[in-house]
Amino acid sequence: MGKTVAEKIFASHIIDNPSGDINVIRLDAVFCHEITTPGAINDLIARGKDKVFDPSKIKAVIDHVSPAKDSKTALQGKILRDWARRHKITDFFDIGRNGVCHAIFPEKGFVRPGYTIIMGDSHTCTHGAFCAFAAGVGTTDLEVGILKGVCAFHYPKTIQISITGSLGKGVYAKDVILSVISVLGVNGATNRVVEFAGPVIDSMSMESRMTLCNMAVEAGATCGICYPDMTTVEYLWEFIQDEFKSKDEALEKYSEFAADPDAEYDRIIDHDVSNLEPQVTFGYKPDLVKNVQEMEGEKVDQVYIGSCTNGRIEDLRIVAEVMKDNRISDSVRCIISPATPRIYQQALEEGLMKIFMDAGACITNPTCGACLGMSNGVLAEGEVCASTTNRNFNGRMGKGGMVHLMSPATAAASAIAGKITNSRLYASE
Amino acid sequence: MKNFNGKALFIDRSDINTDEIIPAKYLTEISRESLKAYLLEDLKLEEFDPTTDLAGKSVIITRDNFGCGSSREHAPWALEANGINLVIAENFARIFKQNMFNCGMLAVELPSETIGKIFKLFAEKESIVEIDLNRSAIVIKGDGQQEEFIFSISDFDRALVETGGWVEYADSKY
Protein backbone atom coordinates (compact mmCIF):
# COMPACT_ATOMS: atom_id res chain seq x y z
CA MET A 1 0.00 0.00 0.00
CA GLY A 2 1.24 3.47 -0.87
CA LYS A 3 1.95 6.23 1.59
CA THR A 4 0.84 9.81 2.07
CA VAL A 5 3.45 12.57 2.44
CA ALA A 6 3.17 12.60 6.23
CA GLU A 7 3.41 8.79 6.41
CA LYS A 8 6.61 8.89 4.35
CA ILE A 9 8.12 11.60 6.53
CA PHE A 10 7.11 9.76 9.71
CA ALA A 11 8.63 6.51 8.40
CA SER A 12 12.11 8.05 8.51
CA HIS A 13 11.63 10.02 11.74
CA ILE A 14 9.87 7.76 14.27
CA ILE A 15 12.08 6.94 17.26
CA ASP A 16 9.49 5.56 19.67
CA ASN A 17 5.93 4.31 19.84
CA PRO A 18 4.96 4.75 23.51
CA SER A 19 1.35 3.62 23.05
CA GLY A 20 -1.27 2.99 20.37
CA ASP A 21 -0.88 5.37 17.47
CA ILE A 22 1.30 7.82 19.43
CA ASN A 23 4.68 8.23 17.78
CA VAL A 24 7.66 10.19 19.00
CA ILE A 25 9.48 11.66 16.02
CA ARG A 26 12.91 13.18 15.57
CA LEU A 27 12.86 16.87 14.63
CA ASP A 28 14.88 18.45 11.82
CA ALA A 29 14.14 21.99 13.00
CA VAL A 30 12.68 23.75 16.03
CA PHE A 31 11.52 27.32 15.37
CA CYS A 32 11.14 29.83 18.21
CA HIS A 33 9.66 33.29 18.78
CA GLU A 34 9.57 35.62 21.76
CA ILE A 35 5.99 35.01 22.90
CA THR A 36 5.87 31.25 23.48
CA THR A 37 9.58 30.44 23.94
CA PRO A 38 10.49 32.43 27.11
CA GLY A 39 8.17 30.19 29.18
CA ALA A 40 10.07 27.14 27.89
CA ILE A 41 13.45 28.76 28.52
CA ASN A 42 12.52 29.79 32.08
CA ASP A 43 11.16 26.34 32.85
CA LEU A 44 14.32 24.65 31.55
CA ILE A 45 16.40 26.98 33.73
CA ALA A 46 14.20 26.23 36.77
CA ARG A 47 14.71 22.50 36.15
CA GLY A 48 18.48 22.94 35.89
CA LYS A 49 18.31 21.83 32.24
CA ASP A 50 19.22 24.97 30.34
CA LYS A 51 20.48 23.07 27.28
CA VAL A 52 19.57 22.78 23.60
CA PHE A 53 19.65 19.53 21.59
CA ASP A 54 21.41 21.07 18.58
CA PRO A 55 21.94 24.85 18.17
CA SER A 56 22.18 24.51 14.38
CA LYS A 57 18.67 23.07 14.22
CA ILE A 58 17.09 25.81 16.33
CA LYS A 59 16.02 29.02 14.58
CA ALA A 60 14.75 31.97 16.56
CA VAL A 61 13.18 35.34 15.81
CA ILE A 62 11.68 38.25 17.69
CA ASP A 63 8.63 38.99 15.58
CA HIS A 64 5.37 39.27 17.48
CA VAL A 65 5.95 42.64 19.12
CA SER A 66 8.81 44.40 17.38
CA PRO A 67 10.06 46.93 18.34
CA ALA A 68 9.15 46.09 21.94
CA LYS A 69 6.14 48.20 23.00
CA ASP A 70 6.66 48.10 26.77
CA SER A 71 8.80 46.62 29.54
CA LYS A 72 7.08 43.24 29.42
CA THR A 73 7.61 42.71 25.68
CA ALA A 74 11.16 44.05 26.04
CA LEU A 75 11.79 41.36 28.67
CA GLN A 76 10.38 38.62 26.41
CA GLY A 77 12.75 39.73 23.65
CA LYS A 78 15.64 39.87 26.09
CA ILE A 79 15.01 36.34 27.38
CA LEU A 80 15.06 34.97 23.82
CA ARG A 81 18.07 37.08 22.79
CA ASP A 82 20.17 36.12 25.84
CA TRP A 83 19.26 32.45 25.39
CA ALA A 84 20.20 32.46 21.70
CA ARG A 85 23.59 34.00 22.56
CA ARG A 86 24.16 31.65 25.49
CA HIS A 87 23.58 28.58 23.34
CA LYS A 88 25.29 29.89 20.20
CA ILE A 89 22.09 29.77 18.15
CA THR A 90 23.46 31.65 15.15
CA ASP A 91 20.19 31.72 13.19
CA PHE A 92 18.63 34.30 15.50
CA PHE A 93 16.93 37.32 13.96
CA ASP A 94 16.62 40.48 16.00
CA ILE A 95 15.19 43.85 15.06
CA GLY A 96 16.49 45.18 11.75
CA ARG A 97 16.97 41.64 10.50
CA ASN A 98 13.73 40.15 11.80
CA GLY A 99 10.53 39.23 10.04
CA VAL A 100 7.31 37.34 10.65
CA CYS A 101 8.47 33.81 11.52
CA HIS A 102 6.53 31.93 8.84
CA ALA A 103 7.80 34.30 6.17
CA ILE A 104 11.44 34.70 7.21
CA PHE A 105 12.30 31.06 7.99
CA PRO A 106 11.33 29.76 4.52
CA GLU A 107 13.02 32.79 2.95
CA LYS A 108 16.28 31.83 4.71
CA GLY A 109 16.07 28.30 3.31
CA PHE A 110 15.38 26.63 6.66
CA VAL A 111 12.50 24.51 5.34
CA ARG A 112 13.14 21.55 3.05
CA PRO A 113 10.97 18.76 1.65
CA GLY A 114 10.82 15.84 4.07
CA TYR A 115 11.63 17.91 7.16
CA THR A 116 9.89 17.63 10.52
CA ILE A 117 9.42 21.01 12.19
CA ILE A 118 7.68 22.29 15.30
CA MET A 119 7.17 25.80 16.63
CA GLY A 120 5.17 27.29 19.47
CA ASP A 121 2.85 28.88 16.95
CA SER A 122 -0.27 27.42 15.38
CA HIS A 123 0.54 28.74 11.89
CA THR A 124 3.65 26.56 11.68
CA CYS A 125 1.53 24.51 9.25
CA THR A 126 2.61 27.15 6.66
CA HIS A 127 5.88 25.29 6.07
CA GLY A 128 4.08 22.26 4.70
CA ALA A 129 4.05 24.25 1.44
CA PHE A 130 7.57 22.83 1.00
CA CYS A 131 6.35 19.25 1.51
CA ALA A 132 7.50 19.25 5.13
CA PHE A 133 5.63 18.00 8.19
CA ALA A 134 5.39 21.21 10.21
CA ALA A 135 3.11 21.53 13.20
CA GLY A 136 2.23 24.17 15.74
CA VAL A 137 2.70 23.10 19.36
CA GLY A 138 2.42 24.56 22.85
CA THR A 139 5.25 25.72 25.07
CA THR A 140 5.78 22.32 26.75
CA ASP A 141 6.18 20.50 23.40
CA LEU A 142 8.49 23.31 22.33
CA GLU A 143 10.50 22.92 25.56
CA VAL A 144 10.99 19.20 24.96
CA GLY A 145 11.81 19.94 21.30
CA ILE A 146 14.51 22.39 22.37
CA LEU A 147 15.94 19.99 24.97
CA LYS A 148 15.62 16.65 23.20
CA GLY A 149 14.83 17.32 19.53
CA VAL A 150 11.71 15.14 19.63
CA CYS A 151 7.94 15.56 19.66
CA ALA A 152 4.96 13.19 20.02
CA PHE A 153 2.16 13.01 17.46
CA HIS A 154 -0.69 10.70 16.60
CA TYR A 155 0.15 8.70 13.47
CA PRO A 156 -1.01 11.05 10.71
CA LYS A 157 -4.30 10.58 8.90
CA THR A 158 -4.60 12.67 5.78
CA ILE A 159 -7.32 14.46 3.85
CA GLN A 160 -6.42 15.09 0.22
CA ILE A 161 -8.01 18.16 -1.32
CA SER A 162 -7.66 18.41 -5.05
CA ILE A 163 -8.04 22.00 -6.23
CA THR A 164 -9.29 21.75 -9.79
CA GLY A 165 -10.45 24.13 -12.52
CA SER A 166 -8.73 27.49 -12.88
CA LEU A 167 -8.76 30.71 -10.90
CA GLY A 168 -10.55 33.71 -12.36
CA LYS A 169 -9.12 37.22 -12.44
CA GLY A 170 -8.87 38.82 -9.02
CA VAL A 171 -9.16 35.44 -7.25
CA TYR A 172 -6.14 34.20 -5.31
CA ALA A 173 -4.80 31.51 -2.96
CA LYS A 174 -6.43 33.34 -0.03
CA ASP A 175 -9.85 33.00 -1.67
CA VAL A 176 -9.16 29.31 -2.31
CA ILE A 177 -8.26 28.57 1.30
CA LEU A 178 -11.19 30.57 2.70
CA SER A 179 -13.51 28.56 0.46
CA VAL A 180 -11.83 25.30 1.55
CA ILE A 181 -12.28 26.22 5.23
CA SER A 182 -15.94 27.04 4.62
CA VAL A 183 -16.36 23.54 3.13
CA LEU A 184 -14.42 21.72 5.88
CA GLY A 185 -15.61 23.81 8.84
CA VAL A 186 -13.37 24.99 11.69
CA ASN A 187 -12.77 21.46 12.93
CA GLY A 188 -13.28 19.50 9.73
CA ALA A 189 -9.59 18.59 9.60
CA THR A 190 -8.83 18.26 13.32
CA ASN A 191 -6.08 15.68 13.94
CA ARG A 192 -5.63 15.40 10.17
CA VAL A 193 -2.96 16.49 7.75
CA VAL A 194 -4.32 18.19 4.62
CA GLU A 195 -2.57 17.55 1.29
CA PHE A 196 -3.34 20.15 -1.36
CA ALA A 197 -3.11 18.67 -4.84
CA GLY A 198 -4.31 19.36 -8.35
CA PRO A 199 -3.61 21.69 -11.29
CA VAL A 200 -4.38 24.93 -9.43
CA ILE A 201 -1.71 24.13 -6.82
CA ASP A 202 0.75 23.04 -9.52
CA SER A 203 0.56 26.49 -11.09
CA MET A 204 0.84 28.37 -7.77
CA SER A 205 4.00 30.15 -6.59
CA MET A 206 5.59 29.12 -3.27
CA GLU A 207 4.15 32.33 -1.78
CA SER A 208 0.63 31.28 -2.75
CA ARG A 209 1.19 27.75 -1.45
CA MET A 210 2.32 29.20 1.88
CA THR A 211 -0.87 31.31 2.05
CA LEU A 212 -2.86 28.14 1.44
CA CYS A 213 -1.04 25.95 3.99
CA ASN A 214 -0.93 28.80 6.54
CA MET A 215 -4.67 28.59 7.10
CA ALA A 216 -4.94 24.78 7.20
CA VAL A 217 -5.04 25.08 11.00
CA GLU A 218 -8.19 27.20 10.72
CA ALA A 219 -9.92 23.97 9.70
CA GLY A 220 -8.18 22.26 12.63
CA ALA A 221 -5.47 20.59 10.52
CA THR A 222 -2.12 19.60 12.01
CA CYS A 223 -0.33 20.58 8.82
CA GLY A 224 -1.12 21.65 5.26
CA ILE A 225 1.09 20.04 2.64
CA CYS A 226 1.89 20.68 -1.03
CA TYR A 227 3.88 18.27 -3.21
CA PRO A 228 7.40 19.24 -4.26
CA ASP A 229 7.91 20.29 -7.87
CA MET A 230 10.21 22.53 -9.91
CA THR A 231 8.61 25.60 -8.26
CA THR A 232 9.80 24.25 -4.89
CA VAL A 233 13.27 23.55 -6.25
CA GLU A 234 13.58 26.99 -7.89
CA TYR A 235 12.62 28.69 -4.61
CA LEU A 236 15.18 26.67 -2.65
CA TRP A 237 17.93 26.61 -5.28
CA GLU A 238 20.11 29.35 -3.76
CA PHE A 239 20.32 27.24 -0.59
CA ILE A 240 20.66 23.76 -2.07
CA GLN A 241 22.82 24.24 -5.15
CA ASP A 242 25.85 22.73 -3.42
CA GLU A 243 23.90 19.62 -2.48
CA PHE A 244 22.76 18.69 -6.00
CA LYS A 245 24.37 18.60 -9.45
CA SER A 246 21.27 20.02 -11.07
CA LYS A 247 17.73 21.19 -10.35
CA ASP A 248 16.46 18.01 -11.95
CA GLU A 249 18.46 15.94 -9.50
CA ALA A 250 17.06 17.95 -6.60
CA LEU A 251 13.55 17.47 -7.93
CA GLU A 252 14.10 13.72 -8.28
CA LYS A 253 15.29 13.49 -4.69
CA TYR A 254 12.48 15.67 -3.29
CA SER A 255 9.83 13.86 -5.32
CA GLU A 256 10.41 10.83 -3.09
CA PHE A 257 8.33 12.69 -0.50
CA ALA A 258 5.30 13.18 -2.76
CA ALA A 259 2.33 10.98 -1.93
CA ASP A 260 2.07 7.63 -3.70
CA PRO A 261 -0.81 7.31 -6.19
CA ASP A 262 -2.23 4.44 -4.12
CA ALA A 263 -1.86 6.20 -0.77
CA GLU A 264 -4.79 5.71 1.56
CA TYR A 265 -6.69 8.81 2.60
CA ASP A 266 -9.12 9.51 5.40
CA ARG A 267 -11.09 11.57 2.91
CA ILE A 268 -10.62 12.84 -0.65
CA ILE A 269 -12.25 16.09 -1.69
CA ASP A 270 -12.47 17.58 -5.17
CA HIS A 271 -12.77 21.34 -4.93
CA ASP A 272 -13.43 23.05 -8.25
CA VAL A 273 -12.53 26.74 -8.09
CA SER A 274 -13.46 27.72 -11.66
CA ASN A 275 -16.40 29.84 -10.55
CA LEU A 276 -14.90 30.95 -7.24
CA GLU A 277 -15.45 34.61 -6.38
CA PRO A 278 -13.25 36.61 -4.00
CA GLN A 279 -14.10 35.47 -0.47
CA VAL A 280 -14.70 37.50 2.71
CA THR A 281 -15.46 36.29 6.23
CA PHE A 282 -18.44 37.76 8.03
CA GLY A 283 -18.49 36.41 11.61
CA TYR A 284 -16.14 35.38 14.38
CA LYS A 285 -15.05 32.06 12.86
CA PRO A 286 -12.93 31.62 9.72
CA ASP A 287 -15.44 29.17 8.20
CA LEU A 288 -18.10 31.88 8.00
CA VAL A 289 -17.38 33.01 4.45
CA LYS A 290 -19.34 34.81 1.74
CA ASN A 291 -18.67 35.94 -1.81
CA VAL A 292 -17.38 39.51 -1.77
CA GLN A 293 -20.50 40.64 -3.66
CA GLU A 294 -22.63 39.78 -0.64
CA MET A 295 -20.37 41.82 1.64
CA GLU A 296 -19.91 44.86 -0.61
CA GLY A 297 -20.61 48.16 1.07
CA GLU A 298 -19.93 46.88 4.61
CA LYS A 299 -18.22 49.49 6.74
CA VAL A 300 -14.44 49.42 7.24
CA ASP A 301 -12.44 51.56 9.67
CA GLN A 302 -9.03 50.02 9.12
CA VAL A 303 -7.37 47.94 6.43
CA TYR A 304 -4.47 45.71 7.46
CA ILE A 305 -2.23 44.13 4.83
CA GLY A 306 0.51 41.84 6.10
CA SER A 307 1.07 38.79 8.37
CA CYS A 308 2.29 35.23 7.84
CA THR A 309 -0.71 34.70 5.57
CA ASN A 310 -0.37 37.58 3.14
CA GLY A 311 2.63 39.83 3.79
CA ARG A 312 4.90 38.46 1.07
CA ILE A 313 6.21 40.23 -2.05
CA GLU A 314 3.62 38.66 -4.34
CA ASP A 315 0.90 40.06 -2.05
CA LEU A 316 2.43 43.53 -2.02
CA ARG A 317 2.68 43.52 -5.83
CA ILE A 318 -1.04 42.76 -6.06
CA VAL A 319 -1.82 45.52 -3.56
CA ALA A 320 0.30 47.97 -5.57
CA GLU A 321 -1.51 46.97 -8.76
CA VAL A 322 -4.83 47.83 -7.14
CA MET A 323 -3.62 50.98 -5.35
CA LYS A 324 -1.65 52.54 -8.22
CA ASP A 325 -3.02 55.99 -9.08
CA ASN A 326 -5.70 55.65 -6.39
CA ARG A 327 -6.13 57.28 -2.99
CA ILE A 328 -7.08 55.47 0.17
CA SER A 329 -10.46 56.71 1.37
CA ASP A 330 -10.34 59.50 3.96
CA SER A 331 -12.59 57.41 6.18
CA VAL A 332 -10.13 54.52 6.35
CA ARG A 333 -6.64 54.06 7.79
CA CYS A 334 -4.54 51.53 5.89
CA ILE A 335 -1.56 49.75 7.46
CA ILE A 336 0.82 47.72 5.31
CA SER A 337 3.38 45.50 7.00
CA PRO A 338 5.88 43.75 4.71
CA ALA A 339 6.61 40.40 6.37
CA THR A 340 10.43 40.45 6.17
CA PRO A 341 13.25 42.95 5.57
CA ARG A 342 13.97 41.29 2.22
CA ILE A 343 10.35 41.79 1.15
CA TYR A 344 10.53 45.38 2.42
CA GLN A 345 13.69 45.97 0.38
CA GLN A 346 12.19 44.36 -2.74
CA ALA A 347 9.07 46.50 -2.38
CA LEU A 348 11.27 49.60 -2.15
CA GLU A 349 13.30 48.62 -5.20
CA GLU A 350 10.23 47.81 -7.25
CA GLY A 351 8.62 51.15 -6.42
CA LEU A 352 5.75 49.56 -4.50
CA MET A 353 6.42 51.62 -1.37
CA LYS A 354 5.99 54.84 -3.34
CA ILE A 355 2.63 53.63 -4.62
CA PHE A 356 1.55 52.77 -1.05
CA MET A 357 2.69 56.13 0.33
CA ASP A 358 1.17 58.10 -2.55
CA ALA A 359 -2.09 56.29 -1.82
CA GLY A 360 -1.87 57.33 1.83
CA ALA A 361 -0.95 54.02 3.51
CA CYS A 362 1.09 53.66 6.67
CA ILE A 363 3.98 51.23 6.17
CA THR A 364 5.30 49.47 9.27
CA ASN A 365 8.39 47.37 9.85
CA PRO A 366 7.97 43.57 9.65
CA THR A 367 6.07 42.30 12.72
CA CYS A 368 3.02 40.20 13.65
CA GLY A 369 1.65 43.24 15.49
CA ALA A 370 -1.97 43.98 14.75
CA CYS A 371 -2.88 40.49 13.47
CA LEU A 372 -3.30 39.30 17.05
CA GLY A 373 -4.03 42.68 18.57
CA MET A 374 -0.66 43.05 20.27
CA SER A 375 0.65 46.27 18.64
CA ASN A 376 0.82 48.40 15.48
CA GLY A 377 -2.87 48.79 14.69
CA VAL A 378 -5.06 47.46 17.50
CA LEU A 379 -8.78 48.17 16.94
CA ALA A 380 -11.02 50.20 19.23
CA GLU A 381 -14.33 48.77 20.43
CA GLY A 382 -16.88 48.64 17.60
CA GLU A 383 -14.30 49.14 14.85
CA VAL A 384 -14.07 46.98 11.74
CA CYS A 385 -10.89 45.83 10.02
CA ALA A 386 -10.59 44.47 6.51
CA SER A 387 -7.59 42.22 6.97
CA THR A 388 -5.33 39.88 5.01
CA THR A 389 -4.58 37.92 8.20
CA ASN A 390 -5.89 34.49 9.22
CA ARG A 391 -8.20 34.88 12.24
CA ASN A 392 -11.44 36.78 12.76
CA PHE A 393 -12.02 35.60 16.35
CA ASN A 394 -13.88 37.86 18.75
CA GLY A 395 -11.38 40.41 20.08
CA ARG A 396 -8.55 39.09 17.92
CA MET A 397 -7.34 42.51 16.71
CA GLY A 398 -8.62 44.38 19.76
CA LYS A 399 -11.41 44.01 22.28
CA GLY A 400 -14.82 44.58 20.71
CA GLY A 401 -13.36 44.82 17.20
CA MET A 402 -14.59 43.00 14.10
CA VAL A 403 -12.26 41.44 11.53
CA HIS A 404 -13.18 40.50 7.96
CA LEU A 405 -10.59 38.20 6.38
CA MET A 406 -9.92 38.62 2.68
CA SER A 407 -7.22 38.61 0.00
CA PRO A 408 -4.71 41.46 -0.41
CA ALA A 409 -6.52 42.51 -3.60
CA THR A 410 -9.89 42.77 -1.86
CA ALA A 411 -8.30 44.53 1.13
CA ALA A 412 -6.58 47.08 -1.13
CA ALA A 413 -9.78 47.72 -3.08
CA SER A 414 -11.68 48.12 0.18
CA ALA A 415 -9.09 50.65 1.41
CA ILE A 416 -9.67 52.78 -1.65
CA ALA A 417 -13.45 52.53 -1.56
CA GLY A 418 -13.67 52.96 2.22
CA LYS A 419 -15.91 49.90 2.44
CA ILE A 420 -15.71 46.25 1.43
CA THR A 421 -15.32 46.19 -2.33
CA ASN A 422 -14.56 43.70 -5.08
CA SER A 423 -11.01 44.12 -6.33
CA ARG A 424 -12.05 43.35 -9.89
CA LEU A 425 -13.27 46.94 -10.07
CA TYR A 426 -9.70 48.10 -9.69
CA ALA A 427 -7.42 45.43 -11.12
CA SER A 428 -5.79 46.61 -14.33
CA GLU A 429 -6.39 44.60 -17.47
CA MET B 1 -1.25 14.35 40.18
CA LYS B 2 -3.37 17.45 40.04
CA ASN B 3 -6.84 17.74 41.54
CA PHE B 4 -9.58 17.06 39.00
CA ASN B 5 -12.65 17.17 41.22
CA GLY B 6 -14.98 20.03 42.00
CA LYS B 7 -17.82 22.27 40.92
CA ALA B 8 -18.66 22.37 37.23
CA LEU B 9 -19.00 25.40 34.98
CA PHE B 10 -21.22 24.67 31.98
CA ILE B 11 -20.39 26.62 28.82
CA ASP B 12 -23.02 25.92 26.18
CA ARG B 13 -21.15 26.85 23.02
CA SER B 14 -18.93 25.18 20.42
CA ASP B 15 -15.68 26.39 18.84
CA ILE B 16 -14.42 28.36 21.84
CA ASN B 17 -11.00 29.54 20.71
CA THR B 18 -7.87 30.25 22.72
CA ASP B 19 -8.13 33.99 22.00
CA GLU B 20 -11.40 33.88 23.94
CA ILE B 21 -9.84 31.77 26.71
CA ILE B 22 -6.92 34.17 27.09
CA PRO B 23 -6.59 37.24 24.79
CA ALA B 24 -3.22 37.77 23.09
CA LYS B 25 -2.59 41.06 24.90
CA TYR B 26 -1.95 39.04 28.07
CA LEU B 27 0.66 36.81 26.40
CA THR B 28 3.26 39.32 27.57
CA GLU B 29 2.84 38.00 31.11
CA ILE B 30 5.76 35.74 32.04
CA SER B 31 4.25 34.30 35.23
CA ARG B 32 1.40 31.83 34.86
CA GLU B 33 -0.33 33.05 38.01
CA SER B 34 -0.74 36.54 36.53
CA LEU B 35 -3.04 35.09 33.83
CA LYS B 36 -5.60 34.21 36.48
CA ALA B 37 -7.69 37.38 36.27
CA TYR B 38 -8.11 37.24 32.48
CA LEU B 39 -9.51 33.75 31.90
CA LEU B 40 -12.39 33.72 29.36
CA GLU B 41 -12.39 37.52 29.32
CA ASP B 42 -13.37 37.65 25.62
CA LEU B 43 -15.77 34.69 25.58
CA LYS B 44 -18.56 35.44 23.12
CA LEU B 45 -21.57 34.21 25.06
CA GLU B 46 -24.72 36.00 26.18
CA GLU B 47 -24.96 36.61 29.91
CA PHE B 48 -21.54 35.11 30.65
CA ASP B 49 -19.53 37.08 33.18
CA PRO B 50 -16.16 35.49 34.00
CA THR B 51 -15.77 37.52 37.20
CA THR B 52 -18.80 35.82 38.79
CA ASP B 53 -19.36 32.64 36.74
CA LEU B 54 -15.84 31.25 37.29
CA ALA B 55 -15.87 31.63 41.08
CA GLY B 56 -15.34 28.33 42.87
CA LYS B 57 -15.42 26.26 39.65
CA SER B 58 -12.88 23.45 39.09
CA VAL B 59 -14.22 21.76 35.95
CA ILE B 60 -15.48 23.09 32.61
CA ILE B 61 -18.10 21.13 30.68
CA THR B 62 -18.62 22.38 27.14
CA ARG B 63 -19.49 21.38 23.58
CA ASP B 64 -17.50 20.87 20.38
CA ASN B 65 -13.97 21.89 19.29
CA PHE B 66 -12.91 23.57 22.54
CA GLY B 67 -9.56 25.37 22.38
CA CYS B 68 -9.32 25.96 18.64
CA GLY B 69 -7.02 28.59 17.16
CA SER B 70 -3.75 29.75 18.64
CA SER B 71 -1.24 27.26 20.08
CA ARG B 72 -0.80 29.37 23.22
CA GLU B 73 -0.29 27.16 26.26
CA HIS B 74 -1.36 30.23 28.21
CA ALA B 75 -4.89 28.83 27.72
CA PRO B 76 -4.37 25.75 29.95
CA TRP B 77 -2.13 27.85 32.23
CA ALA B 78 -4.96 30.36 32.74
CA LEU B 79 -7.33 27.47 33.53
CA GLU B 80 -4.82 25.97 35.96
CA ALA B 81 -4.28 29.36 37.64
CA ASN B 82 -8.02 29.33 38.35
CA GLY B 83 -7.90 25.81 39.79
CA ILE B 84 -9.46 24.25 36.68
CA ASN B 85 -7.49 21.13 35.65
CA LEU B 86 -10.27 19.25 33.86
CA VAL B 87 -12.25 20.16 30.75
CA ILE B 88 -14.96 17.82 29.44
CA ALA B 89 -16.08 18.36 25.84
CA GLU B 90 -17.28 16.58 22.70
CA ASN B 91 -13.80 17.12 21.30
CA PHE B 92 -10.85 19.46 21.39
CA ALA B 93 -8.54 21.20 18.96
CA ARG B 94 -5.36 19.13 18.63
CA ILE B 95 -2.84 21.58 20.08
CA PHE B 96 -5.03 22.58 23.04
CA LYS B 97 -5.68 18.95 23.96
CA GLN B 98 -1.99 18.08 23.77
CA ASN B 99 -1.12 21.16 25.84
CA MET B 100 -3.55 20.03 28.56
CA PHE B 101 -1.97 16.58 28.86
CA ASN B 102 1.54 18.02 28.48
CA CYS B 103 0.79 20.07 31.63
CA GLY B 104 -0.54 17.00 33.46
CA MET B 105 -4.12 18.27 33.05
CA LEU B 106 -7.11 16.34 31.72
CA ALA B 107 -9.07 16.93 28.49
CA VAL B 108 -11.87 14.34 28.47
CA GLU B 109 -13.88 13.67 25.33
CA LEU B 110 -17.40 12.25 25.49
CA PRO B 111 -19.81 11.63 22.59
CA SER B 112 -22.09 14.54 21.70
CA GLU B 113 -25.20 12.62 22.90
CA THR B 114 -23.54 12.12 26.29
CA ILE B 115 -22.56 15.77 26.53
CA GLY B 116 -26.13 16.65 25.56
CA LYS B 117 -27.44 14.43 28.33
CA ILE B 118 -25.04 15.94 30.88
CA PHE B 119 -26.17 19.44 29.93
CA LYS B 120 -29.82 18.42 30.19
CA LEU B 121 -29.41 16.74 33.58
CA PHE B 122 -26.91 18.99 35.32
CA ALA B 123 -26.37 22.36 33.61
CA GLU B 124 -29.06 24.14 35.61
CA LYS B 125 -27.96 22.62 38.93
CA GLU B 126 -25.01 23.16 41.20
CA SER B 127 -23.08 20.12 40.01
CA ILE B 128 -19.96 18.43 41.30
CA VAL B 129 -17.63 16.35 39.12
CA GLU B 130 -15.52 13.55 40.57
CA ILE B 131 -13.03 11.58 38.54
CA ASP B 132 -11.67 8.07 38.99
CA LEU B 133 -8.70 7.90 36.64
CA ASN B 134 -8.01 4.21 37.30
CA ARG B 135 -11.47 3.29 36.07
CA SER B 136 -11.61 6.11 33.47
CA ALA B 137 -14.87 7.16 35.07
CA ILE B 138 -16.50 10.51 35.70
CA VAL B 139 -19.23 10.88 38.29
CA ILE B 140 -21.44 13.97 38.14
CA LYS B 141 -23.64 14.80 41.11
CA GLY B 142 -26.24 17.52 41.40
CA ASP B 143 -29.39 18.09 43.36
CA GLY B 144 -29.62 14.49 44.61
CA GLN B 145 -29.03 13.06 41.14
CA GLN B 146 -25.89 11.12 40.21
CA GLU B 147 -24.62 9.71 36.88
CA GLU B 148 -21.44 7.92 35.92
CA PHE B 149 -19.78 8.20 32.51
CA ILE B 150 -16.85 6.13 31.23
CA PHE B 151 -14.33 7.86 29.00
CA SER B 152 -11.38 6.59 27.01
CA ILE B 153 -7.84 7.81 27.53
CA SER B 154 -4.71 6.52 25.82
CA ASP B 155 -1.95 4.95 27.91
CA PHE B 156 0.30 7.78 26.77
CA ASP B 157 -2.05 10.52 27.93
CA ARG B 158 -2.60 8.67 31.21
CA ALA B 159 1.16 8.47 31.73
CA LEU B 160 1.47 12.23 31.14
CA VAL B 161 -1.20 12.94 33.75
CA GLU B 162 0.40 10.53 36.23
CA THR B 163 3.99 11.73 35.74
CA GLY B 164 2.98 15.40 35.82
CA GLY B 165 3.52 16.18 32.14
CA TRP B 166 5.57 15.73 28.97
CA VAL B 167 8.82 17.31 30.18
CA GLU B 168 9.14 14.78 33.01
CA TYR B 169 8.13 11.92 30.71
CA ALA B 170 10.42 12.85 27.82
CA ASP B 171 13.36 13.73 30.03
CA SER B 172 13.34 10.33 31.66
CA LYS B 173 12.99 8.49 28.35
CA TYR B 174 14.77 10.27 25.49
Image (cartoon, coloured by chain):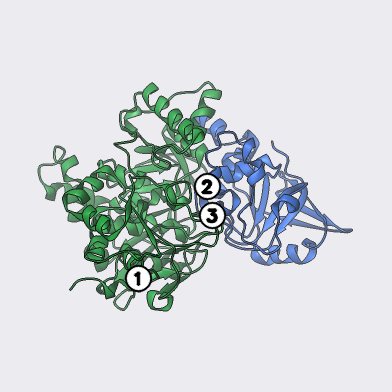
Chain colours: A green, B blue
Query: Dot 2 falls on which chain?
Result: B
Give the crowd class for mark 3: few <14, some 14-19, many >=20 residues within 10 Å: many
Mark 3 or mark 2: whose residue is earlier in sequence: 2
Q: Is residue A274 left or right of residue A134?
A: left
Between disc 1 and disc 2, the foreground one is: 1
- Disc 3 marks which residue? B93
State how far apart marks 3 and 2 are (Cα): 18 Å
**Subunit bearing disc 1:** A
Write the residue at 27% across / 44% down. Answer: A112
SS under mark 3: loop
Q: Quadrant of residue A318?
A: bottom left
The answer to whether A21 is drawn above or below residue B44 in the figure is above
Q: Residue at x 44, y 35 (%)?
A: A145
Observer-nearest of A343 and B125: A343
Identify the amino acid type marked 1. Answer: Ala
Q: CA distance from mark 1 to mark 3?
A: 38 Å
**Label 2 neighbour load within 10 Å: few <14, some 14-19, many 20+:** many
* Residue denoted by label 2: B24
Disc 3 marks a residue whose amino acid type is: Ala
Are discs 3 and 2 both within one chain?
yes
Question: Mark 1 — residue?
Answer: A417
The disc numbered 3 marks a residue on which chain?
B
- Mark 1 → mark 2, Cα distance in angstroms: 30 Å
Task: In this rendered view, identify the residue nearer to me: A265 or B124.
Answer: B124
Q: Residue at x 72, y 58 (%)?
A: B10
At label 2, which amino acid type do we have?
A: Ala
Given this view, does label 3 or label 2 mark the residue nearer the observer? 2
